Image (cartoon, rainbow, N blue to C red):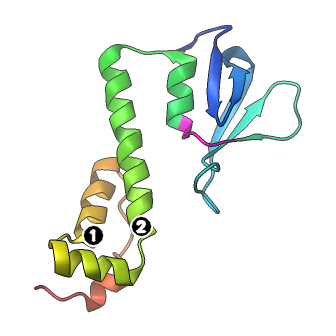
Amino acid sequence: MEIRPGCMVHLGYGKYWRSDHIVGLYPIEEDRGPRRRTEVYVMNRADALIASRSERAILQDMVTLPEDIFRAEEARAVLGDLLDELRELSPIMRRMLHLEANLDVAAWERRLSAILGQERDGGDQEDLFATAD
């Protein structure tokens, strides 16, 4: 990958920064959510900027990639965001989706985690009590 010099990178909610001044991207793990996806470290600034876009989306704007790699990375980012949202569903909403729409959220979480290479050790504790309807 090669950084495209001098282009402005959208960080979300009206924040832009020059691509060649960004020196680091770090995904926010705790308290991640809308407006809080990535810490962006830039030259000549002691503290990180908080971006509302994922590190992958920002990186894609910074670099020159072949089209097929760009599309694959974008799809991966979308799957990651979807997985994050599924993990935040309450147990009540999970049961409602299962009963009303026959949607097994835990199965989709496992499938998306496998695709993204985010397998969990030992599985989810809620799986211990799940019924095979």
Q: Residue at x 18, y 77 (%)?
A: 100
Q: Quadrant of residue 103?
A: bottom left
Residue occupying the far left of the picture: 133
Label 2, on which residue? 87
- Can residue 15 be seen here? yes
Q: Quick check: 118 above or below 17?
A: below
Amino acid type, callout 2: Arg
Q: Main secondary structure of the magenta part?
A: loop
Q: Which region of the structure is painted magenta?
A: 51-55
Amino acid type, callout 1: Val
Label 1, on which residue? 105
- Can residue 1 be seen here? no
Relative to 87, 24 lies left or right: right
Q: Residue at x 43, y 15 (%)?
A: 65
Q: Secondary structure at mark 2?
A: helix
Residue 31: % across, % down: 64, 62
Q: Which mark is residue 81?
A: none
Q: Nearer the viewer, residue 112 or 119?
A: 112
Q: Quick check: 84 above or below 7?
A: below
Q: Quick check: 38 above or below 71?
A: below
Q: Nearer the viewer, residue 102 or 37?
A: 102
The quadrant of the rendering that contains the C terminus is bottom left
Label 2 Cα crowd, 10 Å radius (few <14 / some 14-19 / many 20+): few
Q: Secondary structure at mark 1?
A: helix
Q: Label 2 to label 1, Cα distance in Å?
A: 9 Å
Residue 69: % across, % down: 34, 22
Q: Residue at x 24, y 59 (%)?
A: 111
